[in-house]
Image (tube, rainbow, N blue to C red):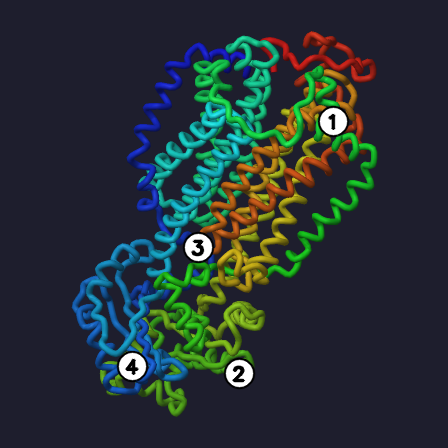
Amino acid sequence: MFYRLGVAMVRLRYWIVGFWLVIVLAGLPFAPRVAEALAPGGFSSDSMQSQQAVEALQAGLHTSFTNVLVFFTSPTLTADDPRFAAQADAALAKLKSWPEVSGIVPFTVNPAQISRDRHAAYTVVLLKADPDTAPKVLPQLDAKLSQPADLRMTVGGGPVFYADIQSVSEADLRRAELLAFPFALIALLLVFRSVIAAALPAAVGGCSVIVSLAMLYGLANATQVSVFALNVTTLLGLGLGVDYSLFMVSRFREELAHGRSVPDAVGATMATAGRAVFFSGLAVSIGLLGLILFPLNMLRSVGIGGMLTVGLCILAAVTLLPALLGFLGAQVNALPVRLPRLRPARASTPVAQSEESGFWHRLAMGVMRHPIATLVPVLTILLLLGLPFLSVRLAAPDASILPTYVKSRAAYDIQVKQFDENALAPIILAVKTQGSPLEKQNLVALDTLVRRLQADPRVANVTSIVSLDPRLTLDHYELLYSHPDLIADPFISTSLQAYAGTNISMVQVTSKYGLLDPRSEALVQAIRGTAPPAGLTVLVDGATAGVIDYVNTLYGAFPIALLVVAIITYIVLMLLFRSLVLPLKAIAMNVLSILASYGALVFLFQQGHFSGLLHFTPLGYVEASGPILMFCALFGLSMDYEVFLLSRIRESYEQTGDNTRAVAAGLERSGRIITSAAAIVIVVSMAFATADMVIVKALGVGMALAVLLDATLVRGLLVPATMRLLGDLNWLWPAPFNKLLPGVVFHDAHGIPSGVSTSSATETPRDEALPVGGN
């Protein structure tokens, strides 16, 4: 089938190239605009209790929790100075009549909004817009702010954070593309030693990226797609688009060298490398399919965008590339690049003898002579690299993932350094009542709840409508709230409007410990696990609760996604290799390289090693979606190389029936090209490691390290060692399965199926020729 497809692409090459030219030109106006159509965020889900609490409070209090924090700082003036307050008030004067603002809470009303040293304070500006649309009104908000004469003004908060994520993502993408394309082209020139051959993978990869970004733009206009899909889509598009073309161009040149005509060489390339590309892309898509199973839009977006990109890479590799090869023919080797040789050229030797003297053949034979002595130390190294992951701390992202030069990060740094972090991000309780919370029985129940919380040794403070002033008792509050419209105290009157609604009340609990401290997390779990007083229903939100829900939502779905990915991958590889053992071994090899990269993730980004070299501020935790993104992306990407290597080993095994010789020959024929392909993916990944956003940087570094380990220790050492230890068991394919799909089919020296069984397989190696019309 693949042979016939290749020949058809050569015959229809004018139509195929014309079709791709049209869709690339059609996509060019939209691909650069994709970022403006993508949505920031995507880290919450309606299934999270914290999200349910926010929605209940917004509906019950008739307000929006979308707010901007305007910080004012001064090295000389304090927030108690009338000049400080007057200048801060004047800076926000134009916002008071702006229709987009639903309310303003100045620091003069709430003392908690003043820093410990009194030289900083912030005002809360409540916006009517929802979190998704709020970033779009920020330019207008900035224009209405007036810069105070003696104060430094910094704008932060959720909408600013999401806007900065979008702008930094765009900047990271532009930088990565500028770095990745030239370095990938240089690597291709070094591999092919020909300008034309090197240009083909770059052109096909570029076409795949342009069309996939244009399609992502269209998808984002039809449904909400997270901005995090942008960088991952481009990373996969560049890496895989170039990789697949690299494998196929290399095989095409090999087939031409064996004397095939151009159509026959393209057909043979498609029947071997093209078939491997198809199944490899299928494996990558299966890995990304796991992301769609998560309830968070950010992960679903990356999964959908990634699968779209991989599909286009496969389509380009099996249609556009064969058509271009049909045009070029032997001219694929034109414009040779002359590079100095490191050692004198050897005299011409037969193919079989040349293969046996090659580096990869000698390495494989050396490993297979001592398989256990190779397996144990390599396995130990990979497990040791993964060891730091045992101390992983998972958390949700905040402004610390952004570079210090953006506004939301500057505001975040002011919060952390000058304010009580716990007071700024308290545990928030949405307390639903039967009727008005100001009714006597509800005030009594609420007072019981508040006193219980105050008695907890982990609690520093509780703010609610029955604990606004420590001098007041429950009787006082009952009297005050019997006529709420007559309350004269401005603080109590303002607080009542902010904390009480029709049938809901808000309670803020300040922990004595940090947001990510296990004791704060235990406090949230204790509140959720304790039955509230009769007549009350409690939902818990806040930064700590949000982190707990985020991590639990992700890792509650992760085992299911992992199982689905592993099972589907096993079935696909079983059908490709006609073996029950090889897919299991491939999955085990992948898991090892991914675990090693997980350890590096903790070592670098949680513990902060080499943070100066990589230019980031250590987080003290691993962003919870990072390991999941890496697993789903790397599982397929690592399988990429396994498919190409085992495909060549299987070809050799069908020629010789000798497992050991087949492994050595397969590694010799694919080792150099797999290493070259891995080098290009590493270059592309490291280009994304220059990102200013820590999440993208971690993904780039993790993928580069995993691919490096996979292409060296795993493919070069572990695969030959395990293949040697398993022997003919590698090709286990029970007789009943042969009725559906034939297992190993041996060929004679002319490439014709000989029909011999495994036990009588000839040991005589044959030429590289393939049976015409088969795969």
Return the residue at label 3: 692
Q: CA distance from mark 3 to mark 2?
A: 44 Å
The kind of residue tagged 3 is Asp
Q: Which mark is residue 455?
A: 2
Q: Position of residue 457 (x, y in %)?
A: 56, 81
Q: CA distance from mark 3 to mark 4?
A: 37 Å
**Considering the numbered disc 1 on the image, is that residue within a helix, a strand or a loop?**
helix
Looking at the image, is 196 positioned above or below residue 502?
A: above
Looking at the image, is 471 positioned above or below residue 517?
A: below
Q: CA distance from mark 2 to mark 4?
A: 27 Å
Label 3 with label 1: CB-CB less than 8 Å: no
Say which of 167 and 126 sits in front: 167
Q: Nearer the viewer, mark 4 or mark 1?
A: 1
Q: Position of residue 357 (x, y in %)?
A: 74, 25
Determine if residue 571 is in view. Answer: no
Label 3 with label 2: CB-CB less than 8 Å: no
Q: Residue at x 52, y 49 (%)?
A: 699
Q: Which mark is residue 664?
A: 1
Looking at the image, is 511 positioned above or below residue 255?
A: below
Crowding near pointer 3: few (<14 within 10 Å), some, many (20+)? many
Quadrant location, the C terminus: top right
Q: CA distance from mark 4 to mark 1?
A: 77 Å
Label located before the other in sequence (2 or 1): 2
Say which of 5 and 356 sits in front: 356
Return the residue at label 4: 109
Q: Position of residue 562 (x, y in %)?
A: 60, 44
The kind of residue tagged 2 is Ala
Label located before the other in sequence (4 or 1): 4
